[in-house]
Amino acid sequence: MGYGLMLGLDPTYILVIIALIFTMVVQTRMRSTFNKYSRIASACGLTGAMAAQRILESEGLYNVRVEHVSGSLTDHYDPRTKVVNLSDAVYSQRSLAAIGVAAHECGHAIQDAREYAPLRIRSSLVPVANFGSAAALPVFIGGLIFSIRPLLTAGILLFCLALLFQLVTLPVEFNASSRALKKLEGTGLMAANEIAGSRAVLRAAAMTYVAAAAATTMQLLRLILLAGGSGGRRRN
């Protein structure tokens, strides 16, 4: 392992920096877009929780609960408990942003009820993806320190599990947003001129998943380059 890497002078850090900048830009845009449409009240007058309940009932999903979860933009659907969890800025708010996000999480509940294949695949990947994320770097670094090629390869393969999870997540998130917008229009919760606001929020949110996948891809590329460099140093 070279001293440049130990001192943080490894030139492949440029990949990490690029990924970090891209992620920060996307997250900033997401929050800016959400804040913009959080200030615009929906004509229907419903809160995010009320809108979510109406969407679920329109799909006959009476077994799915809508609950409040603390935090900012911590909204998520839990397929294990059948709960749509809505954050502070969504649960009791009546804005275009709140209703759009609530509808998106209901989109996941609808996917679950309709046995949407990518959602099933993503759920099955959670344990291996978590293991890969936790073990990849320690295994890889061990391979670098001791110049053990099998450990380097194992670290890269483990990291691929995390990337696979993020790639499968992309169609799940885009599909949930598509279902959400259709339900907002189909149930009359939003007028045509309001849909654009929720669409902008959901598009910005979806880009955060794209950024996460891109960042992981860049990190994977960095590991591959480091593994190749380690092999070259060992041969020399």
Image (cartoon, rainbow, N blue to C red):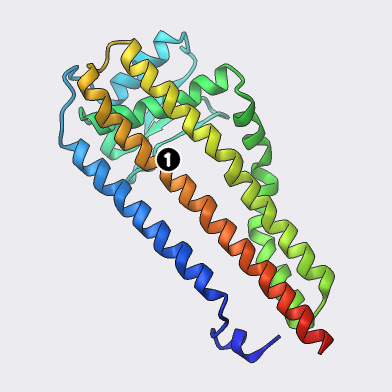
Q: Residue at x 56, y 80 (%)?
A: 11
Q: Which quadrant, please, contains the N terminus?
A: bottom right
Judging depth in this view, the residue of 48 and 63 nearest the camera is 48
Count of numbered tags: 1
Judging depth in this view, the residue of 225 and 166 nearest the camera is 225
Q: Is residue 56 above or below residue 35?
A: above
Q: Residue at x 16, y 19 (%)?
A: 43
Q: Residue at x 55, y 29 (%)?
A: 79
Q: Which residue is mark 1?
A: 206
Q: Is residue 138 above or below residue 110?
A: below
Q: Position of residue 41 (x, y in %)?
A: 15, 28
Secondary structure type for disc 1: helix
Dot 1, how many residues are within 10 Å of its Cα: few (below 14), some (14-19), or many (20+)?
Answer: some
Query: Would residue 60 be found to the left or right of residue 31 on screen?
Result: right
Q: Which quadrant, please, contains the C terminus?
A: bottom right
Q: Amino acid at mark 1?
A: Ala
Query: Would residue 188 be found to the left or right of residue 11 on screen?
Result: left
Q: Position of residue 5 (x, y in %)?
A: 61, 84
Q: Residue at x 79, y 79 (%)?
A: 231
Q: Which image quadrant is residue 3 in?
A: bottom right
Query: Would residue 3 be found to the left or right of residue 61 on screen?
Result: right
Judging depth in this view, the residue of 188 and 235 nearest the camera is 235
Q: Position of residue 37 (x, y in %)?
A: 21, 36
Q: Which image quadrant is residue 33 in?
A: top left
Residue 115 visible in the displayed image: yes
Q: Is residue 159 above or below residue 103?
A: below
Query: Would residue 61 be found to the left or right of residue 135 on screen?
Result: left
Judging depth in this view, the residue of 144 and 29 nearest the camera is 29
Residue 83 visible in the displayed image: no
